[in-house]
Amino acid sequence: MLNNSSELIIFNNNFIPRAELKTCQTTSCTIVYESVRLINGIPLFWEGHWIRLRNSLKEINSKIKLDKILLEQSIFRLIKQNALKNTNIQIEIFEENILVYRIHPEYPTTINYEQGVAVNYIESVRINPTRKILRPTWKKKMERKINEAGVYESLLVNPQGLITEGSHTNVFFIRENKLFSAEESLILPGITRLKILKIAEIENIKLEYAQLKRENVSTFDAAFLSATSLNLLPIVKINNQSFDVNNPILRILMNAFNKHLEQEIKKAAPIWKK
């Protein structure tokens, strides 16, 4: 949440100061959410976020009637009122309430993209991974362990010894000229991840859904994370296993994704700048 209590947020289509917000305080309250990246004040990949938001609500049998036009108007008003440019906004839906506000993500540095980041493993699973549900207790636990380990991210390993995804990211591996991903039933299908799959197809890079066993990680040449705030972020090391951050397939995907991102912003600009 925001630290600036005077900044305006939108609660049920109305502006209120952050300090006046009272969110769901009970453990029985399910909060469906989406974090959307803004670039020059334009929501990136909005249609994908909208579809996933709607699907998450459907999976939990939510009774709320979500109006796309009204939600888009709320987002637009929030951006304009607070002069938001390059940041993230969060949409939260709980009970009959809709909350839209700014968050302050930590974006990777230029050095992170050039040299890659270190990650580790953690034995954990995400409950109902296909649903984008806010789990603050689980999130804080993951963040604490990541900070204690001194790594950028932790990859989740399930009881079967399979690598599924990161604590807040998706993960891909590369061997020779092929891209590898965990089976989709085991992960949250990230919006950035879906774009990567399309780009891989365009670039004629083959994709294989595989059981990514922890003990077989050394057979891969490269690996990278993907997420709304990361785009594609190379992994230089998982525990003591090193990877090639300059792998040709990885760099082809990164460059193609950046070009695609620019095209998406240009296409969306007339809609959100009107």
Image (spheres, rainbow, N blue to C red):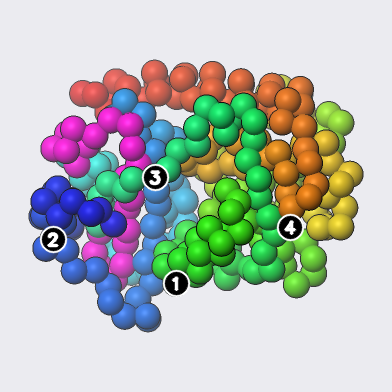
Q: Which quarter shows the N terminus?
A: bottom left
Amino acid identity at mark 1: Thr
Pick the front one: 264 or 246: 246
Residue 177: x and y in percent read 83, 29
CA–CA distance in space, label 1 to label 2: 22 Å
Task: Name the residue nearer the viewer: 197 or 228.
Answer: 228
- Above or below 37: residue 29: below
- The residue that disc 4 covers is 163
Count of marks placed on residues: 4
Write down the residue under mark 2: 19
Q: Is residue 156 above or below residue 227?
A: below
**Mark 2 touching mark 3, by CB under 8 A?**
no
Q: Amino acid at mark 4?
A: Ile
Q: Could you tell me residue 35's position as x and y percent?
A: 39, 48
Q: Earlier in the sequence, mark 2 or mark 3?
A: 2
Residue 35 seen in render: yes
Q: Which element type, helix, strand or loop, lies under badge 2?
A: helix
Q: Nearer the viewer, mark 4 or mark 3?
A: 3
What residue range appears in magenta? Answer: 78-98
**Could you say which is closer to the camera, residue 268 or residue 8?**
8
Categorize mark 3 by other alpha carbons within 10 Å: few (<14), some (14-19), many (20+).
some
Identify which amino acid the numbered label 2 is placed on.
Ala
Whichever of callouts 4 and 1 sits on the residue coming sooner in the sequence is 1
Q: Secondary structure at mark 1?
A: helix
Q: Amino acid at mark 3?
A: Pro
Q: Which residue is mark 3?
A: 105
Q: Which of the numbered marks, if any, corresponds to residue 137?
A: 1
Q: Residues within 10 Å of mark 4 (few under 14, many from 20)?
A: many
Quote the CA–CA distance across marks 2 and 4.
40 Å
Sequence-earlier tag: 2 or 4: 2
* Picture residue at 58% right of the left edge, 41% below the top: 226
